[in-house]
Amino acid sequence: MESSLVFSAWIVLGFLMAMGTLICVPQAQAARAFFVFGDSLVDNGNNNYLATEARADSPPYGIDYPTHRPTGRFSNGLNIPDFLSKQLGAEPTLPYLNPELTGKKLLVGANFASAGIGILNDTGIQFINVIRMFQQFEFFKEYQRRVSALIGPQKTKQLVNGALVLITVGGNDFVNNYYLVPFSARSRQYSLPDYVKYLISEYKKLLAKLYVLGARRVLVTGTGPLGCVPAELAMRSRRGECAAELQQAAILFNPQLSRMLRELNTLFRSDVFIGVNTQLMHNSFISNPQAYGFKTSKIACCGQGPYNGLGLCTVASNLCPNRNEYAFWDPFHPSERANGIIVQQFMTKGSTEYMYPMNLSTIMELDSRI
């Protein structure tokens, strides 16, 4: 459905202090709040409440989720935010559009992500009714008003400032925009290098806006190896090689994203934005899947056609008997087991191989002292 292979990371809400005295907080607020923004890689059900085709609310999605039922996650089970919530010792965040997100559940945080969206508003227009980034931010402002009515403006500010934030967006701007069709509007407007510069400039505005809205610790994922997902292998590969154009897009995008994050951190005089090198994470799976216990990184568990990379994952699709052997669940999205391994890489203590300027273990240790 949606595209991009990118992954990225989360949230821990510490203790609230005022005038040296510990504030009594509800049990739900004991763990750091966690907010999620982005696309289908991190959407956990918002699109279930929208009239859109970009959804994962029917079997076999969710086959390995604890309920064994589809949840709106583009996974056979848990996704990256779920594994991050576990690391934070918190319950999973609810989709913002879920009517159950009320009362003390709001203090856990919220997931605003929506499958199909990108950095640009015209990305994913074929899905029609999705929550684009500007609307996700409007919902975040609305969320803060709702929490303020619950615990007051000052505690709401502390909750948001102390939260961990994950944002995963950008892959769709290539797969579902620039390369969606031959001679797309954006590809006629920009050469690939110029398009990447444009995306980075627009993304910088979004991240600056997120800072204005109160985010102070934000995990920002790059794009994964876009040309190596089963969908692109099925459409563009002759012998199983990764699609060169999409690989070049990722190669251009990720270093510029890193530079832009450093510029923002310099501007705000703090390590607000933490880069997550999802391209490196995925390259490890793709180049040597057996080292991670996978049988294959080319064939999706659920799908049809070459590499199970064509069409949607439905009850009529081919379905692998052992999801743990597959790095990809469907033509675009990692399996539950792959998601878990990615979050383990987030946590690698003392290492900045996958995250910069620090990994999630270091973030949690530093922020627990505040």
Image (cartoon, grey):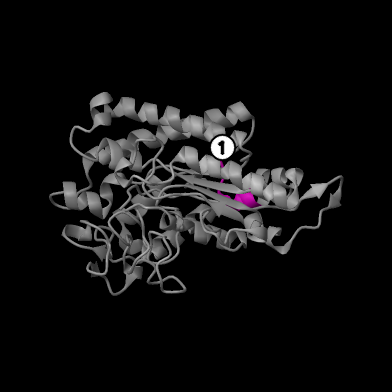
* Viewer-side residue, 293 vs 297: 297
Residue 279 vs residue 328, the one in the foreground: 328
Confirm whether residue 11 shows in the render: no
Magenta residues span 356-364
Query: Residue 17 vs residue 263: left or right?
Result: right
**Horizontal relation, residue 144 to residue 302: left or right:** right
Q: Position of residue 96 (x, y in %)?
A: 53, 53
Q: How many marks?
A: 1
Measured as percent of width and height from the top left, residue 38 is found at: 45, 46
Amino acid beneath label 1: Leu
Q: Residue 50 at what x, y percent from top left?
A: 41, 53
Please determine whether, in this image, residue 303 is positioned above or below residue 234. Answer: below
Residue that carries the numbered disc 1 in the rendered image? 210
Q: Residue 248: percent from the left, percent from the top?
A: 28, 36
Q: Is residue 169 left or right of residue 183?
A: right
Q: Along the line of sight, which residue is nearer the eye, 47 or 326?
A: 47
